[in-house]
Image (cartoon, rainbow, N blue to C red):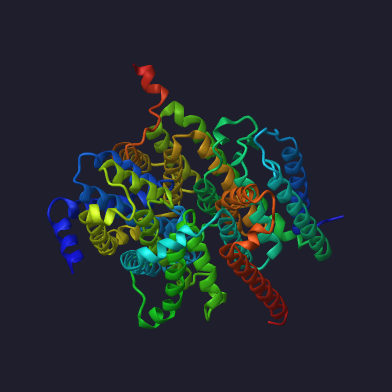
């Protein structure tokens, strides 16, 4: 049986609501707790979400599935988005190692290439200038302490 | 007349005007950086005020506040990244206008309406401080709870055609707001052993992820790079016909901004969303909202700039800082041995009237500086898309990291970006989610405080007249939105 997008979303929301309720139910009870308790509002939210999820699933099931073509067009698009997300995750991992300025330089070059620009000296130079400008704005102008990176320590 | 002379002398003798210029520029720059809130931009300058003349110091901090509240709208319109919490509502129609090649006009409306709003807030600050301060004092925990509920009732109007999906998104946002330390008992909730979550999730992180990162994910996922319409590089202001159309939305923004600024905890974000919703409700073209309506830019921008003046009313008259930015300004006053309250007007009239004059100059300067910096901003967003995506991501990550110097926050923003991407693909509106994240803590903590104070009596919310009035307004708003959605549902199939 093929379910529509709304039906699947509604079921997903329902499952999430149940999981959220279970976590809320296991929250520690404090001696300072009020009558509502730390879990009171979360449990109300979970019940409301479950009801809405069920309603969405039911209306989606009644409406039936969407045409298959609409879904298949998007599969490649999701992969491209996932690729950009992977670049973002790599930035999170590499920034403490490379430092803010260098990591930002690499990020700009990699994202621009991923988004369709050809690798060129110009791009590398623009990335380097941008990394420097960002470093100047945040570290020098705003006085925010950004990671300097491990490579500086290695150099001594 | 004496007040004007005192203000003139305070501003012209010393460094108040240069400090004001610097404050506005710094504020616009800080506000335009994602993650740097007005209060952070002010706090960064606070240490420098120690050695300054009190008038120049206070004027500079207030000018930063004015500039930052406006500055947040620039990236909101151009790159769908709200620089500040209160600019989130501007993103809805501002960015749509930008996509339609009307970025110059959207920025012009934002600048003009922001300036008008700022001047209106200042006029209220000067003329109505004493009577309006009493309103701020009348707010009790039940009234704050009801204020939050009123804010949440806007969800129905922001649901984009599906009330069920809008409510789901709103509850998901509320659930995000429950992460962190419980506001009453101090029990950690939903942190899964992660110490970085103990303080909760900052709304700005959710907004940047949902608006900016999700937009980048959508943009890059387009198989063909659809070239954006040729955008105008010129800053445009509305013509007289459009101005006439914008007047009601500005009046709405001005009124809501005034009262939200007065209520501690209310602030520019709620004011902007409520104004947006009300402007849509009273507009002759409600169908244009969400699709690039100029009124959808004018109302929130006017409202959040009114707050820069009205939020100072409880601070100056009662010594109550109603927002983080007002608290920083309070810090600035205390550094110079000035205790806010009724006596401040007698003890340091030069500071009070100098502040009024400084705010006037700051609003005028905001307009002039806007005229200078907006054309280069327009040029920047017209660069090739790959560069734009790369620079926006770098700016977003740097801005997010700068909030708490936390790599974990960048991971959170990426997570919200994925959530926003999925919600967009599932036709689920994420504005209600933003409202849930912003208003959740206010609603929950005041709900529970009210019950503690009343020994669990739920009628406490109906006994307080302000609370009752706000709840009735919320119910009315909700009923109206549901009725409108049903009507739209009935007319759509036949159209």
Residue A48, quarter of picture: bottom right
Q: Is residue A61 left or right of residue B177?
A: right
Of the pair B321 and B371, the residue shown nearer to us: B321
Residue A156 image offset from top left, x and y in percent: 34, 16
Residue B305 image offset from top left, x and y in percent: 38, 62
Of the pair A76 and B138, the residue shown nearer to us: B138
> Does residue A81 appear in the picture of this structure?
no
Residue B335 image offset from top left, x and y in percent: 28, 41
Residue visible at 25% across and 53% down in the picture: B59
Depicted B6 relative to depicted B293: above or below: above
Residue visible at 62% across and 37% down in the picture: B185
Residue B495 image offset from top left, x and y in percent: 68, 82
Residue visible at 60% across and 46% down in the picture: B177
Depicted B282 relative to depicted A84: above or below: below
> Does residue A91 appear in the picture of this structure?
yes
Q: Which residue lies furthest to the right in this view?
A: A1
Of the pair B493 and B56, the residue shown nearer to us: B56
How many numbered badges does the structure rendering display?
Answer: 0
Q: In this view, does A23 lie to the left or right of B217?
A: right
Residue visible at 34% across and 55% down in the picture: B316
Depicted B198 relative to depicted B204: above or below: above
Of the pair B455 and B309, the residue shown nearer to us: B455
Q: Residue furthest left?
A: B13
Residue A144, quarter of picture: top left
Depicted B138 relative to depicted B392: above or below: below
Q: Is residue B94 left or right of residue B5?
A: right
């Amino acid at each position: 049986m093929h379910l529509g997008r709304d039906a699947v979303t509604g079921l997903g929301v329902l499952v999430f609501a149940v999981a959220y309720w279970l976590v809320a139910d296991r929250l520690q009870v404090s001696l300072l707790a009020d009558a509502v308790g730390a879990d009171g509002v979360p449990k109300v939210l979970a019940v409301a979400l479950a009801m809405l999820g069920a309603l969405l699933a039911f209306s989606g099931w009644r409406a039936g599935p969407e045409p298959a073509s609409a879904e298949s067009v998007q599969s490649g698009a999701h992969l491209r988005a996932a690729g950009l997300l992977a670049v973002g995750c790599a930035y999170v991992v590499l920034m403490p190692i490379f430092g803010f300025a260098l990591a930002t330089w690499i990020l700009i070059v990699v994202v621009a290439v991923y988004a369709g620009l050809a690798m060129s000296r110009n791009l590398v130079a623009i990335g380097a200038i941008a990394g420097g400008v960002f470093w100047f704005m945040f570290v020098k102008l705003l006085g925010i302490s950004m990671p300097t990176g491990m490579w500086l320590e290695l150099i001594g | 007349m004496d007040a004007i002379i005192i203000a003139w002398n305070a501003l012209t003798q010393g460094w108040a005007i240069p400090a004001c210029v610097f404050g506005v520029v710094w504020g616009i720059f800080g506000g335009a950086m994602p993650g740097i809130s007005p209060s952070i931009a002010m706090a960064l300058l606070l240490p420098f005020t120690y050695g300054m003349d009190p008038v120049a110091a206070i004027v500079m901090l207030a000018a930063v506040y004015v500039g930052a509240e406006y500055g947040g709208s620039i990236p909101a319109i151009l790159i769908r990244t709200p620089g500040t919490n209160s600019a989130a509502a501007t993103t809805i129609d501002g960015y749509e206008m930008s996509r339609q090649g009307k970025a110059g006009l959207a920025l012009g409306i934002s600048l003009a309406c922001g300036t008008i709003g700022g001047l209106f807030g200042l006029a209220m600050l000067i003329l109505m401080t004493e009577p309006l301060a009493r309103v701020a004092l009348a707010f009790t925990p039940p009234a704050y709870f009801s204020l939050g509920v009123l804010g949440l009732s806007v969800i129905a109007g922001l649901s984009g055609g599906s009330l069920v999906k809008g409510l789901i998104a709103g509850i998901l946002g509320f659930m995000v707001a429950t992460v962190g330390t419980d506001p009453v008992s101090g029990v950690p909730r939903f942190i899964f052993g992660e110490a970085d979550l103990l303080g909760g999730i900052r709304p700005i992180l959710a907004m940047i992820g949902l608006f900016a990162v999700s937009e980048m994910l959508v943009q890059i996922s387009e198989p063909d790079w659809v070239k954006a319409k040729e955008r105008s590089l010129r800053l445009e202001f509305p013509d007289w016909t459009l101005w006439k159309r914008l007047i009601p939305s500005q009046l709405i923004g001005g009124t809501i901004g005034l009262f939200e600024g007065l209520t501690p905890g209310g602030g520019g974000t709620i004011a902007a969303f409520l104004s947006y919703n009300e402007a849509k409700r009273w507009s002759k073209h409600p169908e244009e909202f969400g699709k690039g309506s100029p009124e959808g830019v004018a109302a929130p921008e006017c409202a959040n700039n009114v707050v820069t003046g009205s939020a100072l009313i409880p601070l100056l008259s009662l010594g109550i800082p109603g927002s983080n930015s007002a608290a920083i300004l309070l810090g600035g006053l205390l550094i110079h041995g000035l205790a806010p309250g009724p006596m401040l007007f007698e003890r340091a009239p030069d500071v009070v009237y100098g502040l009024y004059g400084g705010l006037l100059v700051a609003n005028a300067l905001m307009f002039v500086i806007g005229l200078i910096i907006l054309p280069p901003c327009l040029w920047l967003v017209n660069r090739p898309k790959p560069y734009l995506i790369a620079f926006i991501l770098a700016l977003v990550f740097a801005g997010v990291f700068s909030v708490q110097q936390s790599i974990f926050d960048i991971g959170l923003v990426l997570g919200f970006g994925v959530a926003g991407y999925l919600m967009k693909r599932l036709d689920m509106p994420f504005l209600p989610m933003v409202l849930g994240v912003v208003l959740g803590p206010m609603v929950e903590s005041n709900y529970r405080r009210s019950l503690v104070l009343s020994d669990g009596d739920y009628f406490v919310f109906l006994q307080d007249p302000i609370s009752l009035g706000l709840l009735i307004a919320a119910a009315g708003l909700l009923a109206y939105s549901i009725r409108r959605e049903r009507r739209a549902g009935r007319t759509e199939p036949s159209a």
